[in-house]
Image: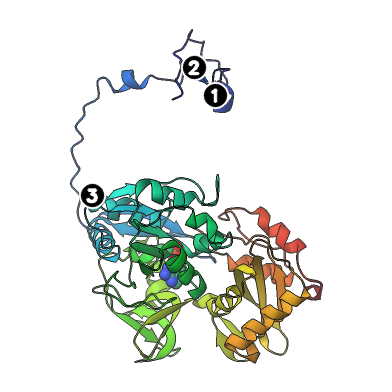
Amino acid sequence: MKTVTPPQSSTNGTNDANPAKRTHFDDKGNFKVVWDSSIDVWWHEAVADVSSECPPVWMDAEDPLFMLYTSGSTGKPKGVLHTIGGYMLYTATTFKYTFDYQPGDVYFCTADIGWITGHSYVTYGPMLNCATSVLFEGVPTYPHTSRFWEIIEKYKVSKFYTAPTAIRTLMKFGDEPVKKYDLSSLSVLGSVGEPINPEAWLWYYRVVGDSNVSIVDTFWQTETGGHVITPLPGATPTKPGSACFPFFGVDVVLLDDEGHEIKGEGEGYLVFSRPWPGMMRSVYGDHERFETTYFKKFPGYYCTGDGAKRDKDGYIWVTGRIDDMLNVSGHLLSTAQVESALVEHEAVAEAAVVARPHTVKGECLYCYVTLAEGHNYDTALITQLKNKVRGKIGAFATPDFMQLAPGLPKTRSGKIMRRVLRKVAVGDRDLGDISTLADPSVVEVLFQHRPKEAKV
Ligand code: WTA
């Protein structure tokens, strides 16, 4: 334990307020603060006369609870407004059933509290269920790449929830960092944030879960408040890469371009035909924008903005944002489909695919790949990767451009900002607002790695 040394003498309040200059460790490793009576107070003095009771303030179920700004990867951020009753009911219920939370379970969600997953499934859902939770602040690779697994062993975590981007990052270090730890306490592993490619799903299941867990691939959005399409552990037979079936009370519909319902097998716009308790109530300060964004395109439905496929068994496969779809020679393709084919190659840790305008095809595929440890980016690999996509999807989907991406432009919540990648693909430096990127410096690196043939 570091000890804080009491003030030797009260300074005259002229101290530099920069905390870095006011604190240091002395030779013995004790934490020292240079006391500034103009801003510093003793905790025990400050709380001495404060009541330990804090009566709740009664609110209406439809009073605002919070708003979270969702950037979308395009356009002006929207303040997604949630209300008290419905949101809390929905996060409490989805938490309980999606993770099958039982007393005695230890739950660990790696999300940042500042984003929706942290709101719904670090804060509200678990607390409303009185769940025992691990709270984590940090990144999965520091101080070492076994950070999550070490925590799971230490606290005997039984329910774990993270994002495909984290899974893929950790996959690139191989199985050994996972296998060093005893993860036998795990029974449910959750995924959220983007489509999880079957490759990552299987690794999560086999290596992290030792083929003895339920994987819950939970589809939802800031706007939906909580899970809207998800398997239920132990109850839903899963398929790697599918978020499976709607949660209780959610009515999933697939629509074609004209707004006709697609029954049975097919692919279209993912919409919901009924409200559910956790749905957002407005865009803060702009109710009209709320109506236009989510309800105008297909009147009578809530429009997620995602595309999805329904297979012959009724399973839903979310294919990604409609804005991210590619149209190559008249074939509509989802970025997720191509990315999933690329990451099947052992050399590829992560992939991101965007459309680049093409005079003949309309659009062509421009693919970014991040390599797993110990692989080289060379012409042989490029050919293998192009063939992989061609073999999986079809000749029309053969990528025209491949580019090495040491890092991908991601938001702090781990989403790839494809808007930026579309700009890099055409060499356009007019990037717009990139302030929500976790690490804006990756963009310049990408510009430097553009292949020669892309420069025409
Ligand atoms: C995507 C995060 C496929 C989707 C909770 C959605 C998913 C957007 C999945 C919302 C999933 C989230 N499978 N895609 N399991 N989960 N998405 O608002 O495109 O940060 O519309 O909420 O993430 O992102 P948001």
Colour style of the rendered protein structure: rainbow
Earlier-in-chain disc, 2 versus 1: 1
Q: Quadrant of ligand 1?
A: bottom left
- Is label 1 in a helix, a strand or a loop? loop
- Is label 2 in a helix, a strand or a loop? loop
Identity of the residue drawn at 42% across and 80% down: 317
Residue where numbered disc 3 is placed? 130
Residue 397, compared with residue 158, is above or below; it is: below
Residue 228 lies in quadrant: bottom left
Identity of the residue drawn at 33% across and 56% down: 158
| Residue 353 at x, y percent in the picture | 61, 74
Q: CA distance from mark 3 to mark 2?
A: 40 Å
| Residue 375 at x, y percent in the picture | 69, 65
Q: How many marks?
A: 3
Front residue (pair 451, 187): 187
Residue where numbered disc 1 is placed? 17
Whether residue 351 sits left or right of residue 203 in the image: it is right
- Judged by depth in the image, the label closer to the viewer, 3 or 2, is 3
Q: CA distance from mark 1 to mark 3?
A: 40 Å
The numbered disc on residue 36 is: 2
Kind of residue at badge 3:
Cys
Mark 2–mark 1 CB contact (< 8 Å): yes
| Residue 27 at x, y percent in the picture | 58, 17
Residue 330, compared with residue 56, is above or below; it is: below
Earlier-in-chain disc, 3 versus 2: 2
Identity of the residue drawn at 45% across and 48% down: 150
Mark 3–mark 2 CB contact (< 8 Å): no
Earlier-in-chain disc, 1 versus 3: 1
Whether residue 354 sits left or right of residue 178 in the image: it is right
